[in-house]
Amino acid sequence: MAGGRIELVALSKRFHEIAVDNIDLQIASGEFFSLLGPSGCGKTTTLRLIAGFEQPTTGRILLDGADVSAVPPHKRNVNTVFQSYALFPFLTVYDNVAFGLRNRKLPKGEMDRMVRSSLDLVKLGAFAKRRPGQLSGGQQQRVALARALVLQPSVLLLDEPLGALDAKLRRSLKVELKALQEQVGITFLYVTHDQEEALTMSDRLAVMRDGKIVQLGPPTEVYEEPADTYVADFLGVSNLMEVDVVERGPGSHCRVRLGDAVLSVEHGGQDTPDRAHAVIRPERVRIEEFGSAGENRVPAMVERLVYLGSSTQVFLRLAAGADLQVLLQNDGGQENLAQGTPVSAYLAPDAVRVLSGGTPAADPTAVGGDDAGFDLGRSSASAAAS
């Protein structure tokens, strides 16, 4: 199962509207790569183009250097796992996995070895004689993976394969799926709207919008250094605050005005207009006693607390009028807070980034982790607008 390098060259697909808009993308052999974005952004169409289920309007699709743009799906060395799994209910697990191999007319002993090896890979060797209806959702997903992997593709395409599972099972299978990819060593191209899935499993990810790639990079880079307000709002939870840039310093340092407060910012000050957005992640905001002295302290009031188990989500209203979300770990060390408590919010200069371009995600409720609490998938800017 060697190879698996994907290259998209000026790839476009037009239906009544443009679904994929002039994408250039390279995915390395053996990489776990995710396409992330809301419904209608073009991620599934891109996957279908690579699979051969759709033909490009313009551009090329290269697999290990060979142009497969006009090659039919069954002649491409790729396989696809769908959200529905598409298992044959009247066949056993063994026969579901063996289905594709039977068309290759392999010797019986070789086929048996491959099927059992594939089932062992997904830890279902003891379930070979069962039918799909006798399996849990997670086990059915593993059968679909085994059926795809037994054909030894160089690329495995996964179209939201965890979407039909409950939240707890999704969390456990994310870890298993990444471990499986590392074990088999082939290229995984994963399509999802769930930012937590993309952050957990990907070596790199691409955030898409309106058929284009907005930002591309490792999960830590895209999360910590969003290219614009759209990426910041879509990938994880963000506090987006309208600010005025009042002073530009060396490098990317600047000072911004938020209401009556002036904040020092270490990232993004040089490439933004005078009127921009400042963003800070909820886990980077620190709550201090009201009136705390020092730079980047902003007066605030506790509006609401939401208990999430391992953490507590705190909603603040700044004196400047902006809403701010804070995520506090429940380690027993945080101060007791209650609705109406006056506090100071410390926005560390290295945690704040000034952004321009883009607009917040149009459907914020479609993102956020499975175990998110009320409004956890929404930015403060989005919450304030509703």
Image (cartoon, grey):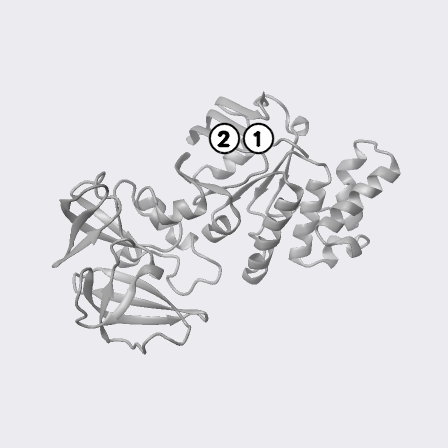
Instruction: Locate the C terminus and report the quarter of the image it occupies.
Output: bottom left
Q: In what quadrant of the picture does the N terminus appear? A: top right
**Quarter residue 375 falls in:** bottom left
Q: Residue at 52% across / 27% down in the picture?
A: 7
Q: Which residue is mark 1?
A: 5
Q: Is residue 74 left or right of residue 224?
A: right
Residue 214 appears in which quarter of the rendering? top left
Q: Nearer the viewer, residue 287 or 111?
A: 287
Is 187 above or below relative to 329?
Answer: above
Residue 100 visible in the picture:
yes
346 versus 64 height, above or below: below
For marks 2 and 1, give the CA distance: 8 Å
Q: Amino acid at mark 1?
A: Arg
Q: Position of residue 361 (x, y in %)?
A: 35, 47
Establish if 145 lies above or below 375. Answer: above
Secondary structure under the numbered disc 1 in the rendered image: loop
Whether residue 90 can be seen here: no
Q: Residue at x 60, y 32 (%)?
A: 4
N-terminal of the pair, mark 2 or mark 1, is 1
Residue 364 placement (x, y as % from top left): 37, 52
* Residue 60 x/y as whole percent: 51, 22
Instruction: Indicate which disc residue 386 carries.
Output: none
* Mark number, residue 26: 2
Q: Position of residue 265 (x, y in %)?
A: 22, 51
Kindly identify the residue that appears in the image at 19 percent across and 53 percent down: 264
* Residues tagged 2 and 1 counted as in contact (Cβ below 8 A): yes
Relative to 306, residue 185 above or below: above
The reply, left or right, for residue 27 in relation to residue 277 is right
Circle 2: residue type:
Gln
